[in-house]
Amino acid sequence: MTPSPSTPQAAIVGVGFIGQAHIEALRRLNVPIAGVLGHEEGYTRREAARLGLHPYLSLDDLLADPQVAVMHQCGPNDVHSAQNLLALAAGKHVFSEKPLGISPEETARQLQAARASGRQTAVNFTYRGYAAVQTLRDIVQGGELGEVVSLRGHYLQDWLLYDTDFNWRVGAPARETRAVSDIGSHLSDLARYVTGLEPGQVMARFSTLHPERRRPVGEVQTFASGGSHTEAFEVTTEDQASLWVEYVGGVQASFELSQVAPGHKNDLELEVLGTRASARWRQERPEEIELASRENTRTLRMKDPAHAFTHYPGGHPEGYPDAITNVLRAFYAGLSGTPDTRIARFEDGHAAALFVEAAYQSHVEGRWSPVTAEQISR
């Protein structure tokens, strides 16, 4: 993408891991970046200087800048809703990290505001940006597997395995959830996107390996940490969860989520089982789709070299940074025309919030919980 005088300029809210991934992708696309905003002034100035970008010292300053056309929301989960609403009111397009909000009430308000604003919005469900995921969707919805019977999936990580592993997500309130909202939302969106099925009800069980953890005192740390200057605190969110999902029409799914699974780094997997064959995609082998049938045929279908999300020839692996870049490329291309339906919109962010809320209600109440808009009024 070659910039022109009319190329929209981006501003990034949040300059941690995912904010810097956005910056890298935007630079690959030659999208101008007007500046960044961190959680406090000193941090913002340091990170902006390191990245060679302008520091915004408040959200008001960022939104008042006429150069900024798109706000990238990469801050903590609990600021997404309020800041996204302010950005839409200021006439900015919004590209938001997931979860879009910490409740269906928040996501519903954002969806309503986005529709009323006339601005373009998207949610970064990154894994849609893999060419192989697009191919998997074509395989499933094109009928190659036959009729879809069931789904299996998991998203397993180990970066919070020890009680000294700390991240701001660990301190979230119980209803916000953690494993379910942070990684389960990715799996639920992937399943919904690939199959075209809508979840109808959920049965969920959460568990917490470490009901008490230790966090740093007097410093901010983003990822796993240890050290002597720590204090104990109570954890109310889940480290892991088992989910059973019934989709509208009767298709069943079983999903496992964990952020305390030893040896698993970013192990996202979805398998779709049909009446003729099954297909499995794994994020850690992102260019491959494994197809299998009763006749014991087991083949690998590689990424489509002709797909718009493929940029290198076979044998030249494309991974996570490429997926984010594909999603952003599609979003920016849609600002001046028709939005790209391959990437997630605020409607999809709202659907994910409804799924997460249903899982939480099921865990609390010990029963199947419907995934419906009725949850907005709870």
Image (cartoon, rainbow, N blue to C red):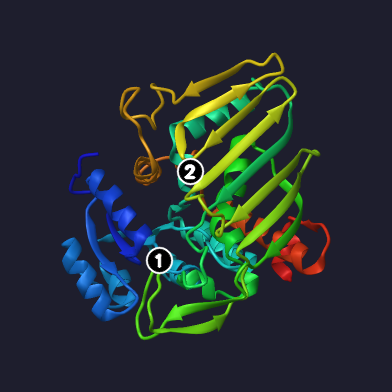
| Location of residue 167 in the rendering, given as x and y in whole percent from the top left corner | 45, 70
| Location of residue 316 in the rendering, given as x and y in whole percent from the top left corner | 31, 28
Q: Is residue 147 visible?
A: yes
Q: Nearer the viewer, mark 2 or mark 1?
A: 1
| Location of residue 250 in the rendering, given as x and y in whole percent from the top left corner | 81, 39
Image vertical order of residue 6 relative to residue 53, above or below: above
Q: Residue at (53%, 57%) from the top-left corner?
A: 115
Q: How many marks?
A: 2
Q: Is residue 70 visible?
A: no
Quick one: which residue is furthest to the right in this view?
367
Q: Quadrant of residue 67?
A: bottom left
Q: Residue at (32%, 30%) from the top-left corner?
A: 311
- Give me the disc on residue 127: 2
Secondary structure under tag 2 reads helix
29 on left or right of 5? right
Position of the N terminus by quadrant: top left
Distance from disc 2 to disc 1, alpha carbons, whole Å, reads: 22 Å
The residue that label 1 is drawn on is: 223
